[in-house]
Image (spheres, rainbow, N blue to C red):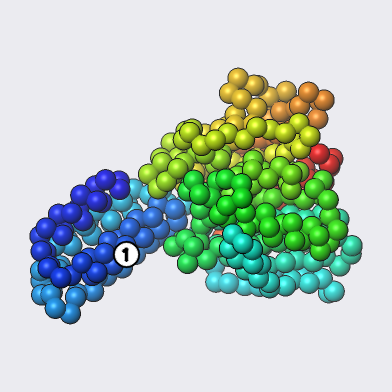
Amino acid sequence: MLHSYTASMRDANRLMDLSGQTDFLQKLQKTFAVAMIDAAFAPLTVQVPKARKPRDAPVNTVVRGLGSTIKQVRAAQSRVPMPLTRSPVPEITPRIPAQAQYLTRKHRSVAGSRGYRLYLPVGRPNGLILMLHGCNQTPDDFALGTHMNALAEKYGIVLAYPEQTRRNSPACCWNWFKPGHQMRGMGEPAILASLTRKLMREFGLGRDRVFVAGLSAGGAMAAILADVYPDIFSAAGVHSGFARGAASGVVSAVSAMRSGGTSTGIAPVIASKSCPVRRIIFQGEDDRTVHPSNAAQIVAAEVGNDVTPDKVAKRTVRGRDYCKSDFTNCDGAVQIELWMIEGSGHAWSGGRAAGSYTDTKGPDASAQMIRFFMANSA
């Protein structure tokens, strides 16, 4: 896809032959590159920006030269799978109980900074979950859709909702597909790890009560954090996400979305016996944005391709059939839970209609994640 885009831009440059307009062409190239990335990673209708004519170039010449490029961008957008759920709703602030707090904060670190929402339950904190939203979502939208605040109040859990911005990603996606954001000590993983450490100190929480969860791009980043920071997180919830290393750029990311990720040669993480990270994985079998095979690849990355589940249960909840597979460690404790949900698309299972990318049917992913996180410390 990027090869054809580059060729089209080369042809456009030749046709226009705008001597002295190098800066203008570079700006146009950047604009169209952003449009293609936005189309690939945001399963929403994306409109192509209209090109502005240069002050000293004829309008007709510019339009003719860019015609083929615009067609390439629009063709790329048409090939991106559309979501099975409705578009994001207008921003609404979640309601909270009296005496609970829902704060807006900013975290700064050597690796970078991010704003975040912080939910503080009424009672003494008993745990911490880092909640990572998906593309074109915000912390408030994610909180509404997952209804995680209500559950956090029940169990005394602090919730941190970091916010990705359009400055860092056109569609507000966590950059899970870039090698610079898949390693320890650098990029977004380093920022998120620094934030988590800060909150651990603030609330006096140890690793056995610290978790991470996310949806789509956020789920992929949750998987990365579980791999590269096992000393911080004791368990991770990955909903409709990807295994670390499933992609190493735009082209391989689109391939992972459409047909499943493959190994990209990224350095593997050697699991620490002293710090095992448990994982609970949810995936809709009718997901047309993130291919369902990515869920199995997350499991394989942890336990290998030849390992079979120790227990399989098939049930139905609110009209959704699902299959839950348990993978245990050498001590017999459940290390991984894999939930495959029939009839569900790219949406948080059992979520609330107030938020975007939710499926109100099926097992409640939020409740099950908290149950899995809090049932037994690693």
- Residue at image position (26%, 64%) is 26
Q: Is residue 375 left or right of residue 75?
A: right
On screen, 125 above or below 334? below
Residue extending farthest to the bottom is 55
Residue in view at x 11 percent, y 64 percent: 16
Kind of residue indicated by mark 1: Thr
Quarter of the image where the C terminus is located: top right
Rendered view: 307 above or below 151: above
Q: Quadrant of residue 153?
A: bottom right
Specify whether residue 247 is in view. yes
| Percent of width and height locating residue 79 | 34, 48
User: Which of these two is toward me, 287 or 71?
Assistant: 71
Q: Residues within 10 Å of mark 1 (few under 14, many from 20)?
A: some
Residue at the front extreme, as displayed:
110
Residue shown at 12% from the left, 67% from the top: 18
What is the x, y in percent for residue 287? 50, 43
Badge 1 element = helix
Residue 100: image quadrant is: bottom right
Seen in the picture, residue 112 relative to 328 is either above or below; the reply is below
Of residues 363 and 112, which is closer to you in this image? Answer: 112
To which residue does mark 1 refer? 31
Residue positioned most to the right? 124
How many numbered marks have been drawn onto this rendered protein structure? 1
Horizontal and vertical percent for residue 134?
A: 55, 56
Q: Is residue 151 visible?
A: no
Where is residue 36 drawn, in percent x and y? 34, 56
